[in-house]
Image (tube, rainbow, N blue to C red):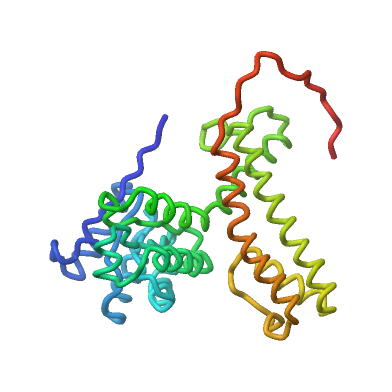
Amino acid sequence: MNKIRISDVTMKQGAEISLSFKEKIELSKLLDKLGVSVIELEPIAQTKIDSLRIKSVAAAVQRSAVAVPVALDPESVRATWNALKDARHPRLQVCAPVSPVQMEYLHHKKPAAMIEAVRQTIADCLALCPDVEFVADDATRSDRPFLYEILSAAIAAGVKTVTVTVLLCSAFATVRNKRQATLFNRAVSGYSIRKAISVVVMFFIVMLSSVILLSLATGAPMLDVMYESVSATATVGLSRNLTSSLPILGKLVIIATMYFGRIGPISLAIALGGKKENPNIISDPIEEISIG
């Protein structure tokens, strides 16, 4: 049976629907009892008042996810998360305009700057909250190539979670001696599993190559080298203050690692998904081999 998810945006339309503080809390409790999947709230405008409102709703809701939009800056992400972090099912929403009119005239950003702002904001959100949603505002007036590009950049931040889920699903199926991996009562294709494995293997190849090259170029302690390499591959921005003291060769290694860490798995996934395999009537024989 298919599962239908319902998001309620009543309180997100603050200017259109006027509700008192108490009414918003009561409405949240009723929506939670009804089994609404996601309760969406207004973003933080006045820090003290809105933070208290979000905290109160988060404490009142037990089953539904509570989603709050964040602006494209680190301060908004931190302030929103501080108010939302006690919710049982918190969700941060990264909302970004994708039409030329809103990008340039309302937010004063060019397409390239908007994509980078979305990438950075999603990375900031994922460092705090595992559930992050990207919302493309005014998408119907966006240029199709740009919409595809910004959606790809947003999905890139979440591809790690999907990949790990698929791999764990496959591992559990193997341990339980099942030939077919299943997830939420749906079978996962072998093609998807192979794609997930390819992304993870490529991640570790880039990371281990960076560790080896940095060790040869710097001679720094292995813990510092591994920390910098993992951080660069995952493009999370963390450091043990080694990067600033690296020689030119070491800095080039870090730059290349960050580039391949961000672009490599995405490009591989697109390349694997972009071409359809030609069906062949004749196939090679299957041989069972011992593994492990």
Q: Is residue 87 left or right of residue 231?
A: left
Residue 245 to residue 70: above or below: below
Quadrant of residue 198 in the image? top right
The quadrant in which the N terminus is found is: top left
Q: Is residue 208 left or right of residue 168?
A: right
Q: Is residue 40 left or right of residue 209?
A: left
Extreme-top residue of the structure = 281
The residue located at (40%, 74%) in the rendering is: 73
The quadrant in which the C terminus is found is: top right
Give the percent coordinates (x, y) of residue 100.
28, 60
Quadrant of residue 136 in the image? bottom left
Give the percent coordinates (x, y) of residue 146.
38, 54
The residue located at (56%, 34%) in the rendering is: 275
Extreme-bottom residue of the structure = 245
Q: Is residue 141 left or right of residue 178?
A: left
Give the percent coordinates (x, y) of residue 7.
30, 50
Give the percent coordinates (x, y) of residue 194.
66, 38
The residue located at (40%, 69%) in the rendering is: 84
Residue 168 to residue 176: above or below: below
Pick the front one: 75 or 118: 118
Pick the front one: 162 or 237: 237
Residue 179 to residue 32: above or below: above
Residue 248 to residue 234: above or below: below
Pick the front one: 251 or 158: 251
Count of numbered labels shown in the rendering: 0
The residue located at (85%, 29%) in the rendering is: 289
